[in-house]
């Protein structure tokens, strides 16, 4: 576990980053339409709770510069509605724009929404994969003590959270990224069957502009469909053989040398003291 001084540094820098991008993402996000050009695979971004779409600015800009059309959804607003309702908005947007071979890039609550869409609202298999950054797939213990209904929905006992945890079918299409410390999620549990990457870094917001995170997002975004299907097949085969466990090189994802990577297991970050 990191030292107390390092944790406090991560914590302070995390909220400074969040404050900066809340202001910039609200006042100077650019025009959504300007990011929709490109010939590469389409990307749909889903921010976290109370985050404007521009909050994901560093990732959006990197993806667009790499040739991907990036779609931010106006109807999400500040993303304060329940996960099922918001998932319906995302699914409707994808269908209305006839997007196919989509990669979802999500932050925090956005990962829950993305998995809900993939699980419940994608009968035509329009979504190929998702990268979820700092998403509370097992909820957050802190949510039990929140006065806001929006935040209490992140409780580990929330019915939507439990339903998503029980649905394992599409986890092999998901890559999760988290740090060893998150001030909002005291214990991050990797998705069973997913590719779970734990960086030796901390924060809930500041990871969004880390070069190593952006590199992982770009790799998943440009990953050929055949490679993605190989990952799914390998994961399902491992599950059938009861041999799921850590893998050292998850199909050439450019992870930092000190990052922990697992597929098919549920690694946890240390609980915050």
Image (spheres, rainbow, N blue to C red):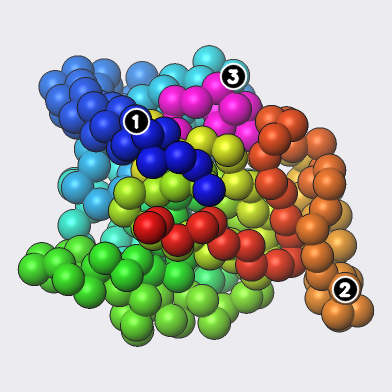
| Disc 1: which residue | 9
| Disc 3: which residue | 66
Quarter of the rendering containing residue 243: bottom right
Q: Please check the rendered image and state whether residue 209 is part of the magenta-colored stretch, yes or no.
A: yes
Q: Where in the figure is residue 272, as x and y percent of width and height? A: 40, 56
Q: Would residue 13 appear left or right of 132 to someone viewing this image?
A: left
Q: Secondary structure at mark 3?
A: loop
Q: Please check the rendered image and state whether residue 35 is part of the magenta-colored stretch, yes or no.
A: no
> How far apart, in angstroms, are the residues tagged by discs 3 and 2?
37 Å
Q: What residue occupies the far left of the structure in this picture?
A: 147
Q: Range of the magenta residues?
A: 207-216
Which badge, 1 or 2, comes first in the chain's sequence? 1
| Disc 2: which residue | 243
Q: Secondary structure at mark 1?
A: helix
Q: Does 19 sit above or below residue 161?
A: above
Q: Residues within 10 Å of mark 1 (few under 14, many from 20)?
A: few
């Amino acid at each position: 576990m990191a030292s107390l001084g390092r944790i406090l540094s991560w914590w302070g820098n995390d909220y400074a980053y969040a404050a900066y991008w809340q202001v910039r993402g609200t006042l100077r996000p650019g025009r959504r339409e300007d990011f929709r050009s490109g010939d590469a695979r389409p990307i749909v971004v889903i921010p976290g709770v109370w985050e404007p779409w521009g909050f994901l600015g560093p990732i959006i800009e990197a993806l667009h510069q790499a040739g991907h059309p990036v779609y931010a959804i106006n109807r999400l607003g500040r993303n304060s509605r329940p996960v099922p309702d918001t998932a319906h908005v995302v699914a409707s947007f994808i269908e209305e724009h006839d997007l196919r071979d989509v990669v979802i890039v999500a932050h925090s609550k956005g990962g829950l929404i993305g998995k809900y869409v993939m699980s419940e609202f994608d009968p035509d298999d329009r979504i190929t994969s998702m990268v979820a950054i700092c998403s509370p797939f097992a909820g957050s213990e802190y949510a039990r003590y929140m006065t806001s209904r929006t935040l209490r929905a992140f409780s580990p006992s929330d019915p939507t959270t439990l339903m998503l945890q029980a649905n394992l079918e599409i986890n092999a299409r998901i890559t999760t990224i988290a740090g060893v410390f998150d001030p909002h999620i005291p214990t991050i549990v990797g998705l069973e069957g997913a590719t779970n990457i734990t960086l030796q870094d901390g924060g809930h917001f500041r990871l969004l502009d880390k070069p190593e995170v952006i590199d992982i997002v770009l790799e998943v975004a440009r990953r050929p469909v055949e490679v993605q299907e190989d990952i799914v097949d390998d994961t399902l085969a491992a599950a059938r053989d009861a041999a799921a466990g850590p893998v050292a090189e998850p199909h050439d994802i450019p992870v930092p040398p000190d990052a922990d990577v697992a597929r098919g297991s549920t690694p946890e970050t240390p609980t915050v003291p």
